[in-house]
Amino acid sequence: MLLTAAIVLLLAACSGSKNGSKMSLLGRFYHNTTARYNGYYYGKLKLNHLKENMTSSLEDDYTRLLPLFKDEEASGGSKSDFDSIIIRLTVVTKLHPKSKWVDDCYYLIGQSYYYKEDYEDALATFQYVSAAFKDDSKKKKSTTGKKIKVDDVTIPWMKTREGLLSFLHQKPVRYQSLLWLLKTYIEIKNYDDAASIMKLLDTDKNFPFDLRDEYALINAQLYIKQERWKEAILPMKEAIALTKSKKDRQRYTYILAQLYQLTNNSDKAIEYFKKVIALKPAYKMEFYSYINIAKSFNGSGKTSADDVLALLEKLSKDGKFDEFLDQIYYTMAEVYLKQNLNPAAVKYLVKSIDASTTNVSQKALSYLKLAEIDFDARQYISADKFYDSTALFVSKSMDKYDEVFHRKEILDKLVANLNVVAHEDSLQHLASMDKNELNKFLDAMIDKYEEQLKKDSAEANNDVQVIEGNKQEDKTLTTGSWYFYNPATKGAGYNDFKKKWGNRVNEDNWRRSNKANNDVDGTATNNQDANGNNTSSGKLTRDDLMKDIPFSPVEKGKSDLKIQNALYNAGTIYKEDLRDYDFAKKTFEDLLKRYQKFPNEPNTYYALYLLYMNDGIQVQMDNYKQLILKNYPNTDFAKLLDDPDYLVKKEAGEKQAENYYQVTFSLYQQKNYAAVLQKTYNVDSLFKPNPLSAKFALLRSFAVAQTQPADTFKNSLKNIVKKYVTGEEVDKAKQLLLGFDKPKDSGKNSKKDSTQTDNSKSIYALHKTNPHYFIILFTGNDPEIKNMDDSLQNFITKNYSLSNYKVSSIMVGQQQAIQVKQMKNMDDAMKFYSDASSQSFYDDISESDYFIFVIDDKNWQLFYSSKNITDYMDFFDKNYNL
């Protein structure tokens, strides 16, 4: 009987009027109950669970403007989870369309669309709810209640006078949907539509009082997203006044204080951060409120610097905030900087770095502040070291990430050139000493160097040592102190330490655990055998120090050329990259005082002409203009001074020459050598000036090699070297001329196999299956050579990570070399040779020639003994298929 009654009741509940008659009371009860508990309840439960999962792992960053809504930065929710809510609730709305919970279901559907970032469907859903579901019950508003006053904000009491049984009335969620509609418009940056809706709500007398706090927050959000900080302040105050949650009041007050910071209202910011502290917030919020009181200090408000420093000093001694000591010291440094007390600021930045044991971001900020102090003071050498240290700790989320690496790149180049000048000046000074004086000086330097090594080893665990090292480097470089005792070259500062040992954790066996990083040190040394094995006791000797001292006139000339180029490069960096025109002028003029008739002299004159033009000093402009016209009348600079349109005309001519060259080169590829010779004849007369003259000359030589005797080819190469002196084409011509210097074949073995003939007079033999080495042999001392091994190691790490190739810097006699070992056989070696040779490792090697080759282990022993590169390159060219 009970089962039958239940079925009858269910059928009665489900039966509605098909012809539009009203649903029975029992039917309404069934649909409302089912829609609420089978749909809305479970949908809301799951949505809240997903929101909690998305926000539970989020931590507030009190150094930035806090988000008004915690879910602003939430992520991680699965779209399929939100889809399941949408599907379930959509089914409920279809099965129970007359239920009073249908609008609530749609409301949750709209939120689900919002969280899955489907903003178009979210907008459509919220618009539907706000338009289709309205509360038609008659309400009266009471404006006679107590008004809410907070500071300068007064909120009238506009709460609905409800009946006794109002709690039984299920209210539509129209206004809640309108608030979410606003949030969605703001999220998609449709601020105009959001503002239009707010104008309507501002005059809506039926707007629920209990939604006023959320409405105030969304109003503030609209302005904050547009960075209209001042306009966000009033609605934030309203939200603080209306919220019933103490935790929310703490958060909103903190945000309000931050808004005052952003509007540079120091006194108000300090006032509200103090109010946050009075509300007794959580540990972190309390600390950052104190810190922000100090950061709000600007020197012109009611709070004095002494007050702020006393507050911070108190915090530093309160054990409660020990984990934040680095930030406390950093903030004290900022206070000193606002008073232009840089030495005190530096002191506390050093303390901040020393205190930063786990907070890598704060360490980056402290190093960066030191870098900026020196950069602004035009102390570029120490600034470079601090930017270098900053780069070790900075994260991509840091606001100045790109600026750090941009400045570091510029300063690295500048300091490299300044180091060259200091280095060569020191060596030239040593060359001028008499023998006894020099030996005495060298012995003293060796003693000091050994003492420095011991000191550095003892202090290597303290990375803040880099700061004092940086200051010392400025002194040594600016006074020309000798480079072997210069920490910039030989010191063991923090960055060199990290490069060698890695960014280690504090553990006893750190040297052993990361020993693999020390196998490839990249340091060139004479104390190595033919296989790159170290045979040195590690002692520094007189001979080590004397090998680079320029005693002969030829060596002195090479040293002078390095100084000339380095000074010119430094002046150009000051002028173009740093826009420090005073340093640029000083550097260029110093170059002109020290040297005359050097390669970059016309460039230097023209740079100074432009610098004085920028200053509007006509006398100096005329002076450098006349120097160019008198001494270098055929240069581009002279022609540009006479004709401002010269460069435009020159560019047009270069395009014509380039097109002509491409046509000629195409003929060479087609082996039409006669046409190549014809087109390259008098080509310099065809294009005046001819920017590709050397290229045409080398191409003509290649055509000569195919059509005329060897001596004619040799003479054409010599003419290239003589006429053009330097450049890529000259380097190629010199390399080809080396092949003419080998002994001539007597002809006795002319009928033998060519390989056998070539090797019959060579000390080398072909061993295809033997282990091979890749070698770069340098014939000069370009300062960029030292960076080559790092570049090569990076190339190997990226492209040959499984091959276990080792890079080492060695000496072959007096020549520097880089050795990569070892490849299994000739085929592997030639593959590596092909890949490595096409890289850009060598672009910066401008002052020295170099040879690239592969060699097997047996031939390497022979080559290391003979050191005759011409003989081996002849063997290499004939036996290794390139």
Image: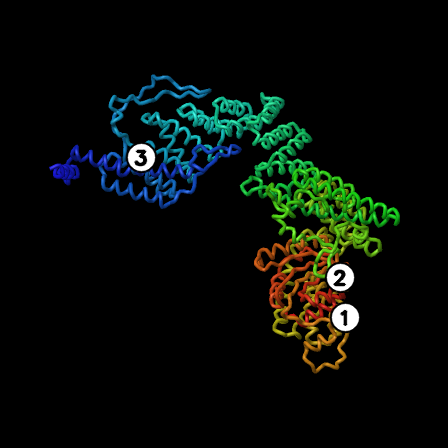
Q: x and y percent of residue 29 in the render?
A: 20, 33
Determine which of the numbered discs, if any, sits on residue 741 in the image: 1
Are there few (<14), some (14-19), or many (20+) residues within 10 Å of tag 1? few
Camera-side residue of 421 and 771: 771
> Where does the image place residue 171, in percent across and percent down from the top left?
28, 30
**Quadrant location of residue 265?**
top right
Instruction: Give the labeled residue for mark 3.
Output: 130
Which amino acid type is shown beneath numbered disc 2? Val
Q: Specify the label residue 725 is tagged with.
A: 2
The kind of residue tagged 3 is: Ser
- Upstream in sequence: badge 3 or badge 2: 3
Q: Is residue 650 visible?
A: no
Distance between the Cα atoms at labels 3 and 2? Answer: 83 Å
Residue type of the residue flagged with mark 1: Asp
Q: What kind of element bears circle 3?
A: helix
Look at 58% across and 36% down and name the residue there.
362
